[in-house]
Image: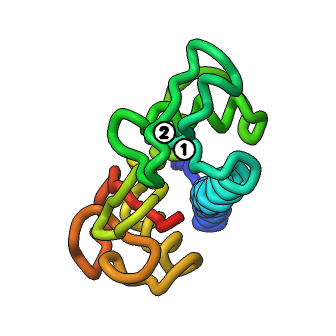
Amino acid sequence: MKKQSGFTLIEIAIVLVIIGLLLGGVLKGQEMMTNAKIKRVANDFNGISAAAFSYLDRYSSFPGDDPNANARWGAPLVSGGGNGIINGGEQPDVWEHLRASGLISGTGTVDPINSFGGRIRVQNNGAGLLGTVICMRNVPGKSAEILDRQVDDGVGNTGEFRQTVNAAAYDLNATALEVCKKL
């Protein structure tokens, strides 16, 4: 009689437990990375707000709209209209003014990138919010909903934090929403 070789039930159970632990660790790691990105985006909203209000306090104009930026820092900085509204042409200058003043790091007019890989913009009006807003692109739906619950009312089309899609509920399967927060 030949002796058959193979795995015992105990060996198979041990292998399955190890695979389960590895998968659990990987999933928990992904969740931790997503939570860190959400925290960085929330900090970006707060940091940009603080920088913009510091600029307003120092120079009596919002960055981008500052009518004295060119005189203060010279070319190639462009002065804004000074009317209290950041129009489309002044949007890139927001970053250049904030960078020239030392309130944020970097150089030039290029929009910063958020932790989800989307551009950050400061603009007039957005997502149904009137006045100066900070908008971030490429935020996953699930993360946008979490952000809204952390900083506002958790509803996508009300409050100070909104998605650009006019809907109360966030599409949790969306991979790239744009969200805006009132400055």
Residue 109 position, x and y percent, is 52, 26
Name the residue that disc number 1 marks.
114
In the displayed orientation, state which residue is furthest to the top: 75
Q: Is 100 situated above or below 148?
A: above
Q: Are marks 1 and 2 in contact (CB under 8 Å)?
A: yes
Residue 70 position, x and y percent, is 60, 23
| Rendered residue at 34%/52% (across/down) | 175
| Rendered residue at 69%/22% (across/down) | 73
Residue 157 position, x and y percent, is 30, 77
Name the residue that disc number 2 marks.
117
Q: Nearer the viewer, residue 25 or 114?
A: 114
Q: Is 8 situated above or below 148?
A: above
| Rendered residue at 47%/65% (across/down) | 181
| Rendered residue at 31%/73% (across/down) | 170
**Secondary structure under badge 2?**
loop
Q: Amino acid at mark 1?
A: Asn
